[in-house]
Image (cartoon, rainbow, N blue to C red):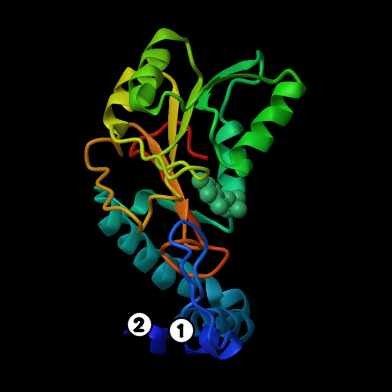
């Protein structure tokens, strides 16, 4: 039924069946139109493109993300080409005068894991990773660790990229983290795959995701929902 919306993908891959539920999706035809329109706007409006970008495109996109995630204020949604950039921006908010204490899982995507491990090698952060197994107690064990340390950053995937395991109780984890810590959830594998309702947690935690997987927007469109009133604004 949706096949006509992917005509270019199927024309390029005749007869191919696509079953990648937990991965990247074919790009629908609408993404070509959108990318072309972006080029047209940039080339034809030149320096006047910002009115189009910040006056029209960004507010509409913010509204879509806020609606899908149940955020109270769409203006809290920031955009970047990839989550790697948001990781760098959030890490830049950590204290620089001592190694920052970071709690995370042993199953974070490369964009976070690689940057974080490199900073650890350089002595700038100290990472504690909570193993996934036994899965039945993961959320409880993670929340206990979150409440037991003086963390500067608590970083956790909502759905794990390497197993599909879903953290059910983001609220409990955010509530367990120290009051002055940054809490960030990587929702890339949840966004547009699961119903996500952040109404109870978005005032406390950052939530990032992007369009390349289940939202099927094509590349280059990631977002970060910033808690209203956050004093650290990456
Ligand atoms: C959990 C998770 N976070 C983030 C990303 C994307 O990271 P980036 O936008 O930096 O390529 C992915 C992509 O596979 C992912 O699975």
Give the CA separation, mark 1 to mark 2: 7 Å
Vertically, is 46 above or below 176?
below
Vertically, is 146 above or below 42?
above
Mark 2: C-beta under 8 Å from nearest atom of ligand 1 = no
**Near-viewer residue (96 or 124):** 124
Q: Residue at x 51, y 74 (%)?
A: 26
Task: State the residue position of label 2.
Answer: 2
Vertically, is 231 above or below 49?
above
How many numbered discs?
A: 2
Q: Can you give x and y, in whole percent of width and height, for residue 53 in the image?
A: 48, 70
Q: Is residue 80 left or right of residue 21?
A: right
Mark 1: C-beta under 8 Å from nearest atom of ligand 1 = no
Q: Can you give x and y, in whole percent of width and height, for residue 147 in the image?
A: 37, 12
- Would you call the spot at circle 2 few (<14 residues within 10 Å), some (14-19), or many (20 or more)? few
Q: Which mark is residue 191?
A: none
Contact flag, marks 1 and 2 (Cβ < 8 Å): yes
**Near-viewer residue (231 or 20):** 20
Q: Is residue 103 left or right of residue 88?
A: left
- In the displayed orientation, state which residue is furthest to the right: 122
Vertically, is 65 above or below 136?
below
- Would you call the spot at circle 1 few (<14 residues within 10 Å), some (14-19), or many (20 or more)? some
Q: Secondary structure at mark 1?
A: helix
Q: Residue at x 29, y 36 (%)?
A: 168
Q: Residue at x 57, y 25 (%)?
A: 94
Q: Can you give x and y, in whole percent of width and height, for residue 156 in the image?
A: 46, 33
Q: Secondary structure at mark 2?
A: loop
Q: Which mark is residue 6?
A: 1
């Amino acid at each position: 039924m949706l096949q006509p919306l992917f005509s270019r993908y199927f024309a390029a891959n005749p007869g191919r069946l696509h079953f990648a539920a937990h991965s990247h999706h074919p790009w629908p035809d609408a993404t070509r139109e959108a990318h072309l329109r972006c080029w047209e706007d940039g080339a034809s409006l030149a320096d006047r493109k910002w009115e189009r970008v910040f006056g029209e495109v960004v507010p509409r996109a913010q509204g879509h993300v806020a609606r899908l995630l149940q955020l109270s204020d769409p203006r809290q949604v920031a955009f970047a080409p990839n989550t790697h950039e948001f990781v760098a921006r959030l890490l830049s908010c950590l204290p620089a005068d001592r190694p920052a204490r970071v709690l995370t899982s042993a199953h974070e995507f490369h964009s976070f894991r690689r940057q974080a491990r490199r900073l650890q090698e350089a002595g700038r952060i100290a990472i504690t990773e909570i193993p996934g197994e036994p899965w039945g107690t993961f959320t409880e064990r993670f929340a206990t660790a979150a409440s037991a340390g003086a963390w500067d950053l608590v970083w956790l995937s909502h759905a794990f990229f390497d197993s599909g395991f879903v953290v059910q109780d983001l609220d409990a984890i955010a509530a367990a983290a120290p009051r002055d810590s940054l809490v960030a959830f990587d929702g890339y594998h949840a966004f547009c795959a699961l119903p996500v309702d952040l109404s109870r947690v978005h005032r406390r935690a950052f939530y990032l995701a992007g369009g390349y997987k289940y939202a099927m927007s094509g590349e280059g469109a990631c977002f970060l929902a910033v808690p209203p009133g956050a004093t650290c604004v990456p």
